[in-house]
C-alpha cells in the first residue's frame, strides 16, 4: 500500500504542505467508483481542485453553476465511472474518443446521459494542436485526462508505442488548454502507482517486512530508465517507464509554463499488483 504524509502544492506566495487526509472525500469524485477494485493516491493536489465540488446556494441548496468538464479517452473503463460521478455531481461532460463509433456507442449504452454528455473525435492525441478546436469551440472548467496508449500485444517499440503517445499526448492537451481555455481551473490526469513503485517484480523481490517499512512520497520515482525499458522488450516494463516519463514531463511543463490552472496526477493501484 502507498503511504504519504503530505502533499505539496504551489501557491502564488510559497510552497505549502497540506496533510493528505484532508482530501479523502475528494478522490472518488473524479477518479473511480467504489465498485472498481483499486486504491487511489494523489501526487500534488492543488488547492483549487476543490472546485470539483459544486458551489451550492446557501438557501436553496442548488448548485450556483453547472461546471463543464472535458474527459479524454471517454470510452475507456475508468472514464465511464468518472463520467457517471461527474454527471451525478451536476457537471455536464464532453468526452473525447478516437473514433465517432465509440462515442455513439457510449450514447447508446448510457441513455441517461442525454443532454448532459456529448463527444468530440480526436483521432491522434499526440498531434500538436489536436485539442485546439475543442477549446476554441467551448469553454471548460475542468479536464480529466484518462486517455493513454494501449498498444497491441505485439508492440515492442518503446518510443513509438509507449513513450511518445504518453508524453506527447499529455503535452498536446496541456498546450492547447493553456492557449485556448482561459476559464480552466484544473486538470486531473490518471497516472499509475508504478511511476513510484516500479514493477511488481521489484516489490516481490523484497520481503514483506521491507515493503511494509517503505513510505512512498511525492519525490520518489521508479528506477526504470528509458534505455532499460527499450532493452527489456517487456510491455509491462515499458508501460511502467512511460507512466513515469509522462508524469515527469507534465511537472516540467508546469514549472516552465506556469499556467493559471492547476494539475493533479492520481496514482492508481490495482489490487492484482500487490
Image: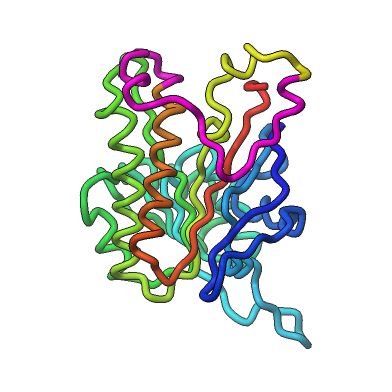
Look at the image and name its color scheme.
rainbow
Q: Residue furthest front?
A: 14
The count of marks equals 0
Q: Is residue 270 left or right of residue 259?
A: right
Q: Is residue 102 above or below residue 186?
A: above
**Would residue 139 be seen by someone viewing this image from the given angle?**
yes
Q: Quadrant of residue 136?
A: bottom left
x and y, in percent, of residue 16 in the image: 62, 65
Q: Quadrant of residue 7?
A: bottom right
x and y, in percent, of residue 9 in the image: 57, 61
Q: Is residue 30 left or right of residue 56?
A: left
Q: Residue at x 67, y 52 (%)?
A: 27
Provide the residue span drawn in magenta.
210-237
User: Is 45 colored magenta in this rendering?
Assistant: no
x and y, in percent, of residue 164 in the image: 28, 36
x and y, in percent, of residue 208 in the image: 76, 17
Q: Is residue 16 above or below residue 247?
A: below
Q: Residue at x 42, y 44 (%)?
A: 248
Query: Which of the two residues, 205 or 75, is positioned nearer the viewer here?
Result: 205
Which quadrant of the rendered structure holds the C terminus?
A: top right
User: Is 236 colored magenta in this rendering?
Assistant: yes
Query: Which of the two residues, 6 or 65, is positioned nearer the viewer here?
Result: 6
Q: Is residue 150 left or right of residue 195?
A: left
Q: Residue at x 53, y 49 (%)?
A: 265
Q: Is residue 268 above or below residue 270?
A: below
Amino acid at each position: 500500500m502507498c503511504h504519504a504524509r503530505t502533499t505539496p502544492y504551489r501557491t502564488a506566495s510559497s510552497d505549502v504542505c497540506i496533510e493528505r487526509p484532508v482530501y479523502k472525500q475528494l478522490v472518488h469524485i473524479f477518479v473511480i467508483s467504489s465498485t472498481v477494485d483499486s486504491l487511489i493516491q494523489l501526487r500534488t493536489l492543488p488547492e483549487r481542485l476543490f472546485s470539483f465540488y459544486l458551489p451550492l446556494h446557501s438557501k436553496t441548496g442548488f448548485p450556483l453553476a453547472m461546471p463543464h468538464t472535458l474527459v479524454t479517452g471517454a470510452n475507456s473503463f475508468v472514464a465511464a465511472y468518472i463520467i457517471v460521478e461527474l454527471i451525478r455531481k451536476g457537471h455536464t461532460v464532453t468526452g473525447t474518443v478516437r473514433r465517432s463509433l465509440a462515442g455513439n456507442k457510449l450514447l447508446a449504452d448510457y441513455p441517461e446521459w442525454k443532454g448532459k454528455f456529448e463527444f468530440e473525435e480526436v483521432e491522434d492525441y499526440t498531434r500538436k494542436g489536436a485539442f485546439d478546436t475543442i477549446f476554441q469551440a467551448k469553454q471548460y472548467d475542468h479536464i480529466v485526462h484518462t486517455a493513454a496508449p494501449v498498444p497491441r500485444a505485439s508492440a515492442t517499440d518503446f518510443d513509438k508505442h509507449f513513450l511518445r503517445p504518453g508524453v506527447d499526448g499529455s503535452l498536446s492537451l496541456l498546450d492547447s488548454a493553456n492557449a485556448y481555455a482561459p476559464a480552466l481551473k484544473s486538470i486531473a490526469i490518471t497516472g499509475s502507482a508504478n511511476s513510484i513503485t516500479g514493477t511488481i517484480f521489484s516489490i516481490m523481490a523484497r520481503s514483506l517486512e521491507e515493503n511494509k517499512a517503505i513510505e512512498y512520497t511525492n519525490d520518489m520515482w521508479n528506477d526504470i530508465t528509458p534505455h532499460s525499458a527499450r532493452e527489456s522488450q517487456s510491455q509491462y516494463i515499458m508501460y511502467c517507464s512511460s507512466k513515469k516519463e509522462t508524469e515527469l514531463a507534465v511537472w516540467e511543463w508546469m514549472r516552465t509554463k506556469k499556467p493559471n490552472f492547476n494539475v493533479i496526477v492520481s496514482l492508481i493501484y490495482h489490487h492484482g499488483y500487490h
